[in-house]
Image: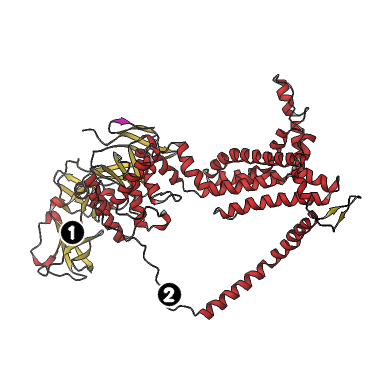
Amino acid sequence: MTGTLPPVDVAPPEVEEDAAPATPEFEAASLRQERRRGLLMALPAYGYLVLFFALPLLIVVVYSFATRNRFGGTDLSGWNIDSYRRLGEPLVRDILFRSVALAVITTVICLVVAYPFAYYMATRSEAVRNLMLVFVMIPFWTNFLVRNFAWRVILGTDGPLSQVTEAVGIGETRLLFTQTAVVLGLVYGFLPFMVLPLYADIERIDGRLLEASRDLYATGAQSFRHVLLPLSMPGVIAGSILVFIPSLGAYVTPEILGGAKTTLLGGYIVTQFLTARNWPFGASLSFVLMAVMLTATIVYFRKGGRTL
Amino acid sequence: MTAAVEITGVSKRFGDVVAVDDIDLRIDDGEFFALLGPSGCGKTTTLRMIAGLDFPTTGSLKIFGHEVGTLPPNKRPVNTVFQNYALFPHMNVLDNVAFGLRMQGTDKATARSAATAAIGLVRLDGMERRRPAQLSGGQQQRVALARALVNEPKVLLLDEPLGALDLKLRQEMQGELKSLQRELGVSFVFVTHDQEEALTMSDRIAVMDEGRLLQIGTPEEIYERPVNRFVADFIGQTNLLEGTVEDGATVCLVNGARVAARSDLTAGTRIALSIRPERATIHHRDHGTGPDAGSAVDGEVVAVTYLGNALVHRVKLDWMEIEVREANDPDRPRFAVGDPVTVAWDPSAAALVADR
């Protein structure tokens, strides 16, 4: 192919300078004033964060280096890193590994279930879309604990699920108090946290881009892989973090739906504080958990993600 | 010769809405074809059906003899330049242009060199690494063009490709698109609502309204011989004098005046006489040099607009106002507001249009 089109300017036209540039002094003063006003408005939120987040976190860190005394109390002396050493113990390692694995499985299942749903929702008319959003939100109207107990009834050996499988002759289901039940409960509980960021991102994508990719010989799968997925990646990452983090530290769901053999990090930490009365160890576990989550979040923001 | 695109009895309904109503269309290979009409006339839907982005509800759609009615877009030898371009924002210019070839399984190196050539074709050399957001509207337009042309489509579809550009750039691109099309010898099917654009660029124009195809013809045919009132009015400016056919050579205007107009319509048919402003002439009534009364009407000048190269006179007739445009000739008499005048035309310059 040979060309006939005349050249275009390489650089877009430059923006004209303002006729009267502001003096540096004035600019600095107005900037200072703006900062001061911003700080004033953010003050309550900052105060809240310091009082209820930074301070307790600091206490956790301090306790994790303290010593447990013979009576189950904690001596704020004899600082050591024993409780961090214990993280290497096989029992603790198993719990850590199992918690991460279940959180990963939960996240992946949520992603696989939520993506098509979010896509479907984003491509409906405004009215249908809003209705579906309400449906996604409805579970939040009921207490989380109650909903978990509802699953206990559903999955129990006398529950409706088991009755159905018995009726069709597969025998009773024994799902309750298994890891499957825990994953099921976690997926159920955290699915909205995956759906919402995905929906928000997919909804913003110009549908014509998908049409353009099909017009340019992409199959449906290629169009998803090369256009839809990359463009919705911020939503995928945001949703994954929002599901992975609470799944990793989940306490209520594993306690209610899981059995003794499925102790997870959240439950184990509670045990350290309430039953084993080993506050330093519980604190170190909490701190490590938090550090993992924080790292994940920072990595996400560094990778060019946007605000959650 | 096989038609590049052959549409037979195609309709498209969205629920109760008929977007395209039983159209027949044949676009030849190597033709610059415009689909022209106001927004909502079905022109874009027609284009989308050729692209495969919408499927016809009924009818047959062939591309180079192959029935493609329900083939998905990726199985059709056509490419589209989308309105507002639809460039992939997460890819640079090179990857945008190479996309079609990559999806067809061309290896990366070949696809990239072909894409580079296409980028050169639209004179964007050196822009390969830029993201669409870093380009001006005109540059994005060219990327969209290169992205479609690199696949060497048998038919290139363009959906209002110049709509988002400012006037100067648009006029420049009109010429470029036309010469590009001539050079590549590929048929371009071009959707526009801008009649001037359609007239300047196209070999043939299809005028659409409310889902129906009203007229297909060369720009000259459409302008000179519009089939109905809508086409006459939509393409360029015109004066529409309503009346009824009296016999094969005469039309009775609404004020009772009889004017010459050849037609083979039956007597009594309601029609309108379309007289382009530049085809009518204006004369002082008292000079006695008045033209043949068989193709003239009397009136009074109500406004004169000086355009430099032309003069536009608004003339009030008994029942309506019409416009007469004359070249600015110093030898011609001048007219002032209030002058009694006669407006005349060559009977062959008046087109008889169905009064719909």
Give the residues drawn in magenta, as a range.
B64-68
Q: As rendered, which of A57 and B347 lies closer to the eye?
A: A57
x, y percentage for residue A193? 64, 46
Q: As rendered, which of A265 and B96 lies closer to the eye?
A: A265
In front: mark 1 or mark 2? 2
Q: Are the residues under marks 1 and 2 on the same chain?
A: no
Gap in angstroms between the C-alphas marked 1 and 2? 48 Å
Q: What element does badge 1 sit on?
A: helix
x, y percentage for residue A306? 56, 55
Q: What element does badge 2 sit on?
A: loop
Q: Chain of mark 2?
A: A
Q: Which amino acid type is marked by label 2?
A: Asp
Reply yes or no: does residue B166 show up in magenta: no
Reply yes or no: does residue B65 show up in magenta: yes
In this rendering, would B200 be left or right of A261? left
Q: Is residue B210 visible?
A: no
Q: As rendered, which of A25 and B82 lies closer to the eye?
A: A25
Q: Which residue is mark 1?
A: B278
Mark 1 Cα shell of 10 Å, populated few (<14), some (14-19), many (≥20): some
Q: Which amino acid type is marked by label 1?
A: Glu
Q: Vertically, is B301 above or below B47?
A: below
Q: Quadrant of residue A217?
A: top left
Q: Which residue is mark 2?
A: A18
Q: Residue at x 69, y 36 (%)?
A: A184
